Amino acid sequence: MTQYCPRCGEKLKDDALYCANCGEKIPRKSKFLNKNLILIIIAVVILIAVSTIFLTNQTQTVKVDNVEFELPADYVKEPIRTDVDYDGNVKSSAMGWSNDENYIEIGVARTPGAGIDSEEVASTLNGTPTKMYGYTGYILDYGNEGCGFVFGIQDEVILVYVSDYDVFDDVKVIGKTD
């Protein structure tokens, strides 16, 4: 592309640093920007797409009794929380979360002090033996009402109930906090 001196209007040679006619210093246009403009635009679009995916896939950490779980951020805690104490021997807590399509309820039962064999308790529920979340437990099928996974962590029996089997993928067990 032909370039002219901004001071005197003389036609300039390609890549001239100064005007041969008046000695004016010639401002340099960035060839980098011209040559790489498309690459820069593509990089910005990719960055925006990745940021959007990252922001929409955020999670929340929730705690039921002293066990932590991770759920997708779009699940909202239901207003009801159940805490039960059976003669001071067995304590139970349950909380639920839902989004526009699914429901998750997590219950934790424990025996303070003496402890219980949580795996033995889970096995008495007669579900289908399976391994999920890194724990051996039992799947309970409630038909059209959803399903649950019962397993033990030390002296606690945990039930993760979901409205649909695929919702198990939305739950991550972090573990006990104490």
Image (cartoon, rainbow, N blue to C red):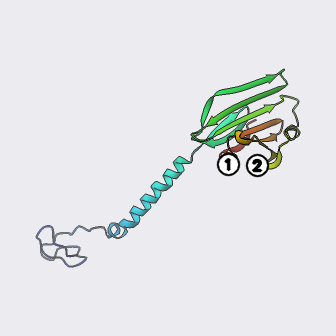
Residue placed at 47% from the left, 55% from the top? 49
Task: Measure how far apart labels 2 and 1 are at the Cα level.
Answer: 13 Å
Residue placed at 52% from the left, 52% from the top? 53
Location of residue 168 with respect to 80 vertically, above or below:
below
Residue marked by disc 2: 132
Residue 6 in the image: state x and y as whole percent.
15, 67
Q: Quadrant of the C terminus?
A: top right
Which SS class for mark 2? strand
Q: Is residue 71 left or right of residue 67?
A: left
Location of residue 45 with respect to 131 vertically, above or below:
below
Residue marked by disc 1: 166
Callout 2–callout 1 Cβ contact below 8 Å: no
Q: Is residue 140 left or right of residue 11?
A: right
Q: Amino acid at mark 1?
A: Asp
Residue placed at 35% from the left, 70% from the top? 35
Residue placed at 64% from the left, 38% from the top? 103
**Mark 2 or mark 1, whichever is nearer to me:** 1
Residue 175 in the image: state x and y as whole percent.
74, 41
Q: Quadrant of the N terminus?
A: bottom left
